[in-house]
Image: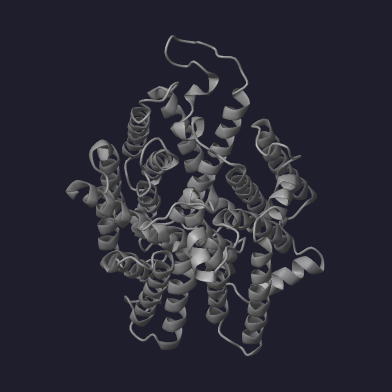
Amino acid sequence: MTLPAFLPFQVAATTAVAAWSLHGEYDAEKNAMLLLLAAAFYSEYIGADRDPTDARQGIMGGAPLGALALPWLFVSRVGGPNFPLFAFWISIATNFALLPGLPWIVARGASVAAISAGARELNYVNVGHEPYPTEWTIATVVAVHVIIATSFARDVPVWFPRVFTRWEAALVATGAALCLGDVSMWTAHRAAGALPDLHLTERKWEHPTSWMPLHIAFGQYDDAQLAMEACVLIACVLTLAAPTLAPEVRTRATILIAAGTSFLAAWGTTVALRLGKAFRGHEGIAHWFVDYVTGAEDLMNLAAYWALVFGAALFAIRRLGVRGAPTIALRKAYHLLAVVAFAPASLPGYAARRLMGHGLPHPEMLAVAYAVALLVFALGECVRTSRAGWLGRSIDDIFSRFTDSRDDHGSVVISHTSLLVGVAVPLWLNHEKWSASAELDHSVGALAPLAGIISLGLGDAAASVFGVYFGKTSVCAGCGKTVEGAVAGAVANMAGLLFAWWVVNRHKETPWGCLLMAGVGTAALEATTEQLDNAFLPLHMAAVLQLVSRNAALEHYQYA
């Protein structure tokens, strides 16, 4: 299939915007990103980026888009010894190692060089913090993350045949490695905090936790963030166990292994966090969650709103199914449901009060709810694949009405999970905007937590439905996407962004250029790639919104 010429141009343009936002002390990050872009284009050009036999085929925009999506997002948020800078270097090193077509020694050498450069940069920003890790200790921590991510990325297509492409697997693997590392390092940091000083050298290693990155050693991790990451990790383990429960491969041994692994993951995560002194005053995550929910301000408002919205939506979608509506219309109805259900609770506290006269629970509650819902989805997938009893067969029958080509031949159904993760990730990665007392933000970056809701709930849904009913002009030969659908997606994205801007910053001048870059660019990406929309569109929109906000701030600083 011919790759539309616009896609590599768009990937290069977004990378250029990201590079422009990195000045002075971030030259190493800029150079690493540009080198990764060049290597990804080379891999795509020589035709090496073909998915493995077990992977779902999806090669349009494979290497460039897959390799740069996470670095864009992390670069848009760097600024000091924080998590995005640490995660940026892990994603860079991981993607260098995963690029096919490069000579083995070049790919591994580039990955090792990225680990070394990342350790040097992370150590450089530690100035002013004592105790602080040396370059080789930081390099070790980054290397462990990269090894876990690359191993997981290569195994995912084997564990889930014909479900993920190579670069979708890379996204999942990098995210899982970062979550696992975060929880593990935080637990070790808090547990070792009670140990006496070792004084291994005169200036450094004054404490057992001095080897840790500063976003852990000096970070302010709260219970909500740790609970979210714990739920994500347990959901990953349950999803891994799901294929082994299918009747055609199920044995007593596989059932025992799946049950044992899931129990150990849940129990081990809880014990680890308790060891790390998380959830103080509670018996565990479950006890903390009950107290957290019952103590949430304005929770009844949100519960009543969700009951009304989900009840009406289920009735409407059932009516559509009875009337024989196309599968695409039924699937995208859930995208629209995500907008109606989650957008109000995603708003900053000041914007929600301004719009509705009172607040819903602040976005922190929604971030935790996303993680709990992901855990429930994983449990539901285990029940579905097992087809045990009336519940398993009922879930499988319901899901069969909404599956597409990505789900028909795979061992698990990922459409509903990827939609949930797609709307959740932009909010999860904007932790500073969770608080009900979050500071007023007049930049377009304030819209980043809504990127998944807008790009998937409005843009992707409009493009798909409009393209099916009214599309006539194909984007490229043999491609199922149409120009009419792409235009509808761009219009829907812009409408969503403009409304969100009016709600958040109604008294400020509308930044048309910034919103056009995010809205139209994301619609163009949806039209020109066969990678999973739910995975890449939110990352692209969130990254562009934060990059243009960062560049605007830099220009204001330079010319002030």
Q: Is residue 552 left or right of residue 410?
A: left
Taking depth in this image into account, of 33 and 541 the one nearest to the observer is 541
Residue 154 appears in view: no
Taking depth in this image into account, of 322 and 110 the one nearest to the observer is 322
Taking depth in this image into account, of 209 and 119 the one nearest to the observer is 209
Q: Is residue 481 left or right of residue 277?
A: left
Q: Extreme bottom residue here? A: 323
Taking depth in this image into account, of 101 and 338 the one nearest to the observer is 338
- Residue at 41%, 58% in the rendered image: 446
Q: Image height check: is 130 above or below 274?
A: above
Quarter of the figure with the N terminus: bottom left
Q: Image height check: is 213 above or below 432?
A: above
Q: How many marks?
A: 0
Measured as percent of width and height from the top left, residue 477 is found at 32, 77
Measured as percent of width and height from the top left, residue 67 is found at 37, 51
Q: Image height check: is 455 above or below 140?
A: below
Measured as percent of width and height from the top left, residue 43 is found at 31, 51
- Residue at 65%, 73% in the rendered image: 310
Residue 372 appears in view: yes
* Colour convention: one colour
Q: Is residue 529 left or right of residue 282?
A: left
- Residue at 63%, 81% in the rendered image: 317
Quarter of the view holding residue 283: top right
Measured as percent of width and height from the top left, residue 50 is found at 39, 57
Quarter of the view holding residue 468: bottom left
Q: Extreme left residue here? A: 559
Quarter of the view holding residue 89: top left
